[in-house]
Amino acid sequence: MPGDLDSELVNVLLSCKEQVVLLCVQNLESVQPYDDYHELLELVIIVFGGYPYSFGQAPCTMSHGWHT
């Protein structure tokens, strides 16, 4: 039975993946109180085949104050 539940969950998620990615992108545009939540949203987008816009940035261009 657990295998059936897993395959049903996968089918449900795949059927609504565009809505999931859109929801994650919309939430990324707002300020997130925790970095973990921001990272989770980006990972969900990647898992569903999207490309979060912040992944195009090199780590040194983020707000760490480092220069290349």
Image (cartoon, grey):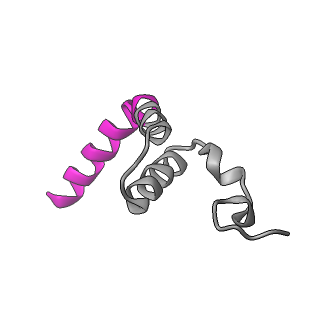
In the image, residue 32 sits, relative to residue 26, either above or below, namely below
Q: Residue at x 25, y 44 (%)?
A: 8
Q: Is residue 55 left or right of residue 39?
A: right
Q: Position of residue 34 (x, y in %)?
A: 37, 58
Q: Is residue 55 magenta?
A: no
Residue placed furthest toward the right: 68
Residue 41 pos. (x, y %): 44, 49
Q: How far across and down, in percent of the image, does residue 62 sit? A: 66, 59
Q: Please tell me which residue lies in front, 56 or 62.
A: 62
**In the displayed structure, does residue 17 sit left or right of residue 5?**
right
Magenta stretch: includes residue 17: yes
Where on the picture, by quarter, is residue 11? top left
Task: Between residue 29 and residue 12, name the one nearer to us.
Answer: 29
Quadrant of the image occupied by residue 51: top right
Question: Residue 1: x percent and y percent?
Answer: 14, 57
Residue that appears at 50% across and 51% down:
42
How many numbered discs? 0
What segment is highlighted magenta in the picture?
1-20
Extreme-left residue of the structure: 1
Q: Which of the two residues, 60 or 13, is positioned nearer the viewer here?
A: 60
Quadrant of the rendering where the C terminus is positioned: bottom right
Left or right of residue 10: residue 61: right
Q: Main secondary structure of the magenta part?
A: helix
Residue beneath the point at 70% across and 67% down: 65
User: Is residue 52 toward the left or the right of residue 65 in the image?
Assistant: left
Q: Compared with residue 15, is residue 28 higher up or lower down, i.e. above or below? A: below
State whether residue 47 is above or below residue 21.
below
